[in-house]
Image (tube, rainbow, N blue to C red):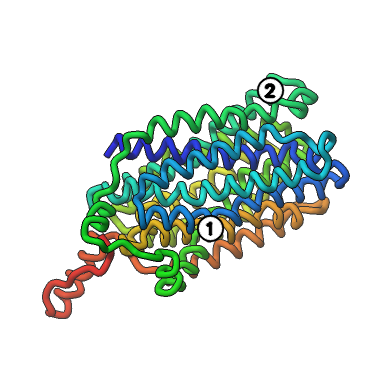
Amino acid sequence: MLRLALASLAGTAIEFYDFFVYGTAAALVLGPLFFPSFSPLAGTLAAFGTFGVGFLARPLGSAVFGHIGDRYGRRPVLLGSLLLTGLATVAVGCVPAYGSIGVAAPVLLLLLRFLQGLGLGGEWGGAVLLTAEHAPEGRRGLWSSFPQIGPAVGFLLANGLMLTLSAALTEAQFTSWGWRVPFWAAGLLALTGLWLRRSVEETPQFTALAETGRRAEAPLAEVVRGHWRLLLLTGGALAVGYAVFYAVTTWSLAYATERLGVGRTVMLACIMTAVALKGLVTPLVAVLGDRYGRRPLCLAGCTACALWMFPLVALLRTADPLWMTLGFLGALLGMVTMFAVVGAYLPELYAPRIRCTGAAVGYNLGGVLGGALTPVVATALADGSGPPWGVAVYLTAVALISLGCFALLPETNPMVVRARAAGAAVRTGTGAAETAAPA
């Protein structure tokens, strides 16, 4: 299990590195380089618009790779998604700026960001099922949390390299070519990930499906036809996690450097500290999910996010590194209370024959609802001289919507479900009951 979990973590870290390095570049340099005729605010909005395209592509990627995962196995998904995202990321670093090729520059940027989203949309489902379908029932949450650590590792790699280059190079050097280096590095990382995953075995649950001929013929159609309500609920439930994460890691970076005059290096260091601590607590929270259930932690995380958004904006507004880091950390701890357990939660909501498609599409639908719009909406709401309270209102509203969606979802932890059923049977005198949660 440790070998499988580490291979899964490495892949998601590399894929999310590719995705996050674009978000950081969008906040720092892409606006003036690719949209030079725009005002600074409009250029930032346009750069964040191309950032959002990646999220719009993710559900499509999850549908395509989910079909492959449910029809042909989880393993091909792990290799294909990593290769696609890596190649697209390297290509972003090679696109000439607007001054060299004109309007073709932002068009190419848009296309490559779309391909990045396609690859990442397939990555999460394959990586999570690799651990979830191999893990013992009582530790499924713990082992499935390893892919959820990947985004934190990928973010730290992407921003650590950006931070190093930003500190080592002059402003002119960084703007000219320095920002491209992290994109080129994605090629080496992708080759490393493919090497780590080359010997990964197929999951036992898919092997059993293939041997008995019970694979879904059209998994996406089956999911949409029979589980559309579940898809909408999971997408809405996960929206707040994406909204909070990208408000902290992308919007706040642009806002503080452009509007508050905070140095780029200082902001990256504050955000990276909070993200690193988030990654460290992820497996600890997942263990709680194995013991007490997935749903209670998700409800607690949504509630914490709803209560913390106004303090987050107030602490960001101080422009003090210590207070800003505290604000970021509080928001990310609320977010990770949910996302540490969704690696087990979402697969448990679907039967094995449609699990790769259902879990991945639901997860990435949340990315569209919460991640694609947040940097753009937050940037527009923060346009003014006063504190950006509109951003806090927006994030709080998203948190409350997600809270309502989680409240409508069932508990899936097999041990918790069986314990509750047994307790209910004892109270009613009807005997032991069997859980309906998928294995």
Q: Is residue 259 visible?
A: no
| Disc sitting over residue 359 in the figure | none
- Residue 57 in view of the camera: yes
Instruction: Tell which circle, 2 or 1, labels the residue nearer the N-terminal end.
Output: 1
Q: Where is the C terminus found, in terms of image quarters?
A: bottom left
Label 2: element kind:
helix
Q: Residue at x 65, y 61 (%)?
A: 394
Question: Quadrant of residue 422 in the image?
Answer: bottom left
Q: Nearer the viewer, mark 2 or mark 1?
A: 1
Please state the horizontal and vertical placement of residue 199, each as a whole percent of the image.
32, 34
Residue 217 x/y as whole percent: 36, 65
Q: Nearer the viewer, residue 17 or 421?
A: 17
Please report contact status of discs 2 and 1: CB closer than 8 Å, yes or no: no
Q: Position of residue 184 (x, y in %)?
A: 61, 29
Which class describes the residues within 10 Å of circle 2: few (<14), some (14-19), or many (20+)?
A: few
Mark 1 surroundings within 10 Å by alpha-carbon count, few (fewer than 14), some (14 through 19), many (20 or more): many
Answer with left or right where residue 379 lies relative to residue 344.
right
* Vertical comparison of 419 with 225: above or below: above
Residue at horizontal 50%, vertical 39%? 83
Element carrying mark 1 = helix
Which residue is identified by label 2? 167
Dividing the image into 4 quarters, which one contains the N terminus?
A: top left
Residue 59 has which mark?
A: 1
Amino acid found under the numbered disc labelled 1: Pro
Q: Residue at x 76, y 49 (%)?
A: 46
Three-letter amino acid code at the position of disc 2: Ala
Image point (52%, 27%), residue name: 188
Left or right: where does residue 201 sit relative to residue 386? left
